[in-house]
Image (tube, rainbow, N blue to C red):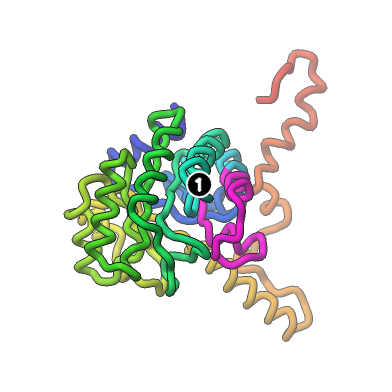
Amino acid sequence: MTVTKSFRDAMKAGMVVAPGAYDCITARSIERAGFSAIYMTGGGTAASLGYPDFGLLTMTEMADNAGRIAASVKLPVIADADTGYGNELNAIRTVREYERRGVAGLHIEDQGFPKKCGHLEDKTIVPIEDYVAKIRAAVSAKADPNFMVIARTDARAPLGFEEAVRRANAAIEAGADMAFVEAPQTLDEVKAVPRLVKGPCMLNMVWRGKTPDMPLSDVEGLGYKLTILPGVLSRSVLGACEIALANLKQQGRHPMPTSDITPHQAFQLAGADEWDRYRTQFRQPSKQAAE
């Protein structure tokens, strides 16, 4: 079964929860934890390359990271594709490049430049005509009909909730597989999105962001099909790094890691057991291929 088909099947069984990964280490952690999908966070990807989430990464940098993550796990990966990196032509190439790298789906937003994280202020929004044309182009570029094109709108903050819903419905009408109304600001708005949008909906849960925090079971009860938690690992890792380095500086010796594991165990988490088999496997004439 393809990852695109497995992702759609998972949504039929209930709301999919996709924690955010920014590299292969965090992606494998999500897989080991038993989740059914992974979200490649754009903000985390940008930070891992030394930039804020201001649209400074290129399409190929983002697609390459999505591809590395997808290759390291068996789970479907849904990836941030920012604005599609230009106009309709760029959106077409973006879908082709992400799909070619084994990603199960992506989302494209209606921000202008410089774009920002959806939970920051002062975002610029493009005209709805430009946005809808870009979504149509992205949908037309799919080689696999199960590949997910998710239409994200950041219109809530600058243009209001009604305009955000209008844009989400326009994107669904243009062929988007799912609508992503970014950063609804009240519980009533969170509840209203799946009721007002005429298609499957996605929610973004950001710690101390604009959207009210709530139990995932309640989110599913509202009718959402996908919830992402982009920063659940990146912020945790950042905090753990700050604490470990402060302890090192203060104590003058190696602090105990949060997970007190040996070097061997750490390499096992990175797939060492598989690669250790290959050390001797091909010394036997009967072994012709990697198992």
210 part of magenta stretch: no
61 part of magenta stretch: yes
Q: Which residue sits at x=24%, y=60%?
A: 218
Q: Which residue sits at x=26%, y=61%?
A: 163
Q: Is residue 108 above or below residue 136?
A: below
Residue 4 visible to an observer of this rendering: yes
Q: At label 1, which amino acid type do we have? A: Glu
Q: Give the image location of residue 114, x and y in percent.
A: 52, 65
Q: Is residue 131 above or below residue 55?
A: above
Q: Give the image location of residue 50, x and y in percent.
A: 66, 65
Q: Nearer the viewer, residue 67 or 236?
A: 67
State the residue lying farthest toward the left: 195
Q: Give the image location of residue 155, x and y in percent.
A: 34, 63
The image quadrant of residue 274 is top right
Q: Look at the image and give the residue range highlighted in magenta.
A: 40-66
Q: Is 117 left or right of 244, judged from the image as shown?
A: left
The image quadrant of residue 49 is bottom right
Q: Is residue 137 above or below residue 27?
A: above
Q: Which residue is mark 1?
A: 31
Q: Nearer the viewer, residue 224 or 94?
A: 94
Residue 30 visible to an observer of this rendering: no
Q: Which residue sits at x=70%, y=20%?
A: 289
State the residue lying farthest toward the top: 286
